[in-house]
Image (cartoon, rainbow, N blue to C red):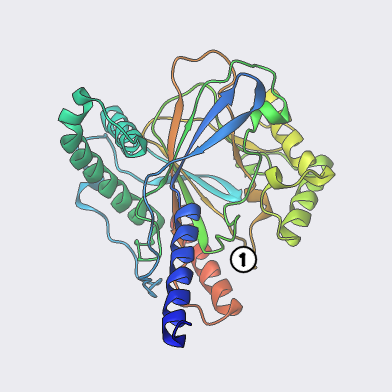
Amino acid sequence: SFHPTFILHVTVLVWCIAIIVSVQTQSVSALIIRPLPSHPLCRLSPSRVAIVSHAAIDPVINKRASPPSEIKGSNCEGTLTLVPVSRKPIILSSSRPLLTSDECDILRRYFSALENDSVDTAVADHMEDLMERGQRILNEVHDKIDYLTGFPRHGGESPLPRYLRYEPHPQTDPSRETLLPLGLHVDPNNGQYLRHISVLLYLTTNDAGATTFPLAHPFGMKTPKCSMEELEMAARELVGKDIHHTYKVDTEVSTKLEDAAVRLYENPPLGDGGGMRIFPQAGHVCVFYNYGDNGYADPNSFHGGEALLGEFERSKDLLTFFKEIPLPLRDRDDFTEKIKGARRHLLERYFSS
């Protein structure tokens, strides 16, 4: 028979291995989205980019990020700031590109290289230079996002953004399945409740494949129609049930939201009384806030990536950065107060003039 101490050590070892495997399974940083010839849905191929550690978490949230020295650099003309385009939910877009087209291309190749298990000889010769340039550009992007949002990075946030690539889809029928391969969602989904700000950095310019916000109230929108109010009630119902992704449920309520996104696609720019579509422009960012003042996911922030329907020569590539409320948190009220403070900061900085 085995000594009890030996059994205890083996048990602890097995438990640790299980945790490591679980983290590796859940912490992938990228998705490649390709249409399958035999099926209208898309296949998700998780990348093997990196396993992110959340061990060191900075408790500071009131500290504001200082502007990076290159914020007015010569790479892109004009002062970099954010321009508000919707107050419900809070959506802003960059006044100019954060990156040049060449820098966007380097990041595309950088993340593609991180995904590949094998590299041919021609690429291997330039791999070290690509990795150095890609990491440098990525660090500069982090600095600019910290400055634009007003919230510096901390140890609880992923150092690598999520990389998404949408391949062109030969079908042109804008059904829910073809137009929204991943459905609609709010970004605190999958238990990621600390994500309060989302930043989409587009690496390509595309005439299709917009990011759709079917419940947004863009500036200049007329009084919402009754159908818009019904949509908001439906979205609140999902959030109230802690359902943050229409792709995971097949109900009349989730279908109603996705149908609204299809109508918005077919009837731009304001669709059924409201809604907004952000088209990819290389180097630009779309920034939006995921919570309301009540500390719960903002129902109006349901959004999704439209597929590239039609014959296109290039893919749609983007990076998604998440700014997270840092731990520790005393309780639910403390979390809500931090959410309200962050929202107030964005509103006072960009919406007050």
Residue 88, image x, y percentages: 63, 50
* 211, 230: nearer the viewer: 211
Residue topped by disc 1: 293
Residue 218, image x, y percentages: 61, 41
In this picture, is 222 found above or below 282? below
Residue 353 visible (yes or no): no
In this picture, is 157 found above or below 231? below
- Figure quadrant of residue 291: bottom right
Task: Find the residue positioned furthest to the front.
Answer: 1
Amino acid under label 1?
A: Asp
Residue 135, image x, y percentages: 24, 45
* 346, 325: nearer the viewer: 325
Task: Find the residue positioned furthest to the bottom.
Answer: 4
Name the residue located 20 percent from the left edge and 30 percent from the top edge.
124
In this picture, is 148 found above or below 305? below
**Would you call the spot at circle 1 few (<14 residues within 10 Å), some (14-19), or many (20 or more)?**
some
Question: Dot 1 lies on which element?
Answer: loop
* 7, 211: nearer the viewer: 7
Name the residue located 39 percent from the left edge and 75 percent from the top edge.
59
